[in-house]
Image (cartoon, rainbow, N blue to C red):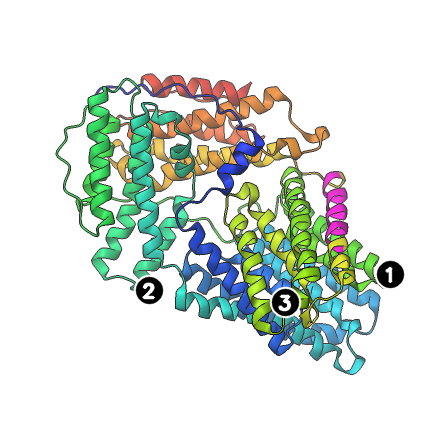
Amino acid sequence: MAEVIAPDVAEHKKPPLLAQLRVDLAPFPFRAALTWRIALLCALVVGTAMMYGTFEAAISCYLVIFLSKPDAVINIGTGIGLIVVVTIVVALMIWVINLVIVSPLVLMLAMALASFVFLYIGAASQLGEMGGIVGLVIAFVLSLVYMAPLGDAVSIALRYAWYMVAMPMAWMVVFNLAVGLSPVRLLKGTLLRRLATAADAISSGAPARHAELAELMRADNGALLQQAASVRVLNLVPRNPAQQVASDVRAGYRLMLAASALPEDTPPARRMALVDAIRAAAAALEAGHMPAMPTMEPANPAERELIAALAVLAGAPEPEVVAAPKPPFFFPDALTNPDYQRFALKTTAAAMICYLIYTGLDWQGIHTAMITCYVAALGTTGETVHKLGLRIVGCLIGATLGMGSVLFVIPQLESVGGLMALVFVCMLIAAWVSTGPERIAYGGVQIGLAFLLTVIQGFSPGTSLDSGWDRIVGILLGNVVVYLIFTHLWPMPIEKAARAHLKAALDGLSRLAALAPERRAGAVPDAALVENEVGKAEEALALLPFEPRAIRPTPETTAKLRAAGEEIAALGRDIYLSREALPGAAARLASLAARIDGGTGDAGVPQTDAPGTIGRRLDRLQRAVMS
């Protein structure tokens, strides 16, 4: 079998800030569709809050913009799930409040304990950010107890908290049932984008260095497979087409993987023939037809996989799928890794400090400080500082929109409909940013939250700048407290998170190498996982400028981690395409995985007789990990 020599890993130069911002704000498929849906849903939530006197409409809208995803099925499931969880929590809180209302000290201890427990569960499990939301709801409920009339404290606090969450989630469910984006439509759009990008990358003559193709390959393919599973489970299309949807998701990724591995010395005529075949398949799919079966003969392993992927899109049976291991609900180190407890403790401490500040000053207008602590805290210090920067910039933009509205627009409004129109227009700006890449997404969430906190004051539109200013001060106070705690108390270095992602990638690569050669074609889930984890490691390292210098790795260490990630990604493509036995490669990769996150692994790294390019890449990877 002819060996394909993949091009050497290219250096990835970070684009200038303004150029990157233009890219992040540029339209892409379904961005506009999701933007107007989020804006309209927020307007409906605000209108309902004004008509029925629901407390903290801004927080209700925050939940909408923060939790909304493109897929209507996911949104419906999230809405129903959060309503159920919050209902259970609020019911339990009746008993808890009756216990803690006897003393402000006992009340605060209960707030801290509940906050710690749910933040810890969220950090140590697949629950993730939902744990923080539940912790926020509990802490918020308890903070309202002494604000309500004594006899009604329990019922008023619980009603406010339940309405604050259940009303927007109910709207999310109904709205997505009516006009939500179908997962079938989204999956088809993603597949067409994959085909178009692969064709463009091949046309460029350097597919391995094509930025958009690399970005698509490092996206979460597992999430798309979950969408495909929901299509099948919910019978959104007939059974056979539903099975083809999942096959197309894997085939689309397989095609991108093969395209990125095409040799750069492929003759132009051959490249254009491949491009024509991909574009013909895309045109047929867009028209709703089955593509024609490809007739080209492959000249190398990359072309073999590309043509095989086109054949699957044309209806040919795909190889036996080799699924990646399903992660457990709780992470394997949930009880042994102190980082989860430390994260929960730091976030809780920040929230309690803010609570003491605004309670001690009797300045309830800045209660947004406590809310900020729950929504700004992230695992690593660099991520948290980056998010704080997005919060501050977004806060200033949103506050400017809100105060301008209070001064010039709200005095002219005569009905709830006018307020809803104002919210819709301004939330279009926030939602457009929030639907972008992670680099800027939270800035959009903060624009929307700051705008709404300024404009919506109590159960009516704001007519005073004082209340809006108080809420902005609260956000800034929360940012300062979180920054001080997360940079001085058990700071979590980005290097550790990057190494954990590279270890996960190496684990997937080890499983890929251990497969029998004839089964590797069906191991798309593991091949995609390798790329995704390497992408996460790169994203983490890109946040190093936000990290305090005291915990930042040396430039040499950073360069080695980046080199290791690039070699892992290249190895993933090479091993996936290889149809030769790779004796010892899996054990060698497993040993390197044990070392890259700080472990010692075995006494020595086993050697391997892997052929050609794979052997050389393994040697380079080992030097990057061991040096």
Comparing marks 3 and 2, which lies closer to the viewer?
3
Badge 1 is on which residue? 360
Quarter in which the N terminus is drawn: top left
Badge 3 is on which residue? 57
The residue at the far bottom in this view is: 151
Residue found 58% across the figure and 62% down from its top? 423
Mark 3 vs mark 2: which is more N-terminal? 3
What span is in magenta? 474-487
Badge 2 is on which residue? 234
Our reading of the magenta stretch's main secondary structure is: helix
Residue 452 versus residue 366: which sits nearer the camera?
Answer: 452
Q: Position of residue 152 (x, y in %)?
A: 75, 81
Q: Is residue 389 above or below residue 414?
A: above
Say left or right for 544 vs 268: right
Q: Quadrant of residue 384?
A: top right
Residue found 66% across the figure and 34% down from its top? 546
Q: Quadrant of residue 555?
A: top right
Q: CA distance from mark 2 to mark 1?
A: 52 Å
Q: Could you tell me the amino acid type at mark 1? A: Gly
Say left or right for 333 vs 190: right
Mark 2 vs mark 1: which is more N-terminal? 2
Residue found 59% across the figure and 73% down from its top? 416
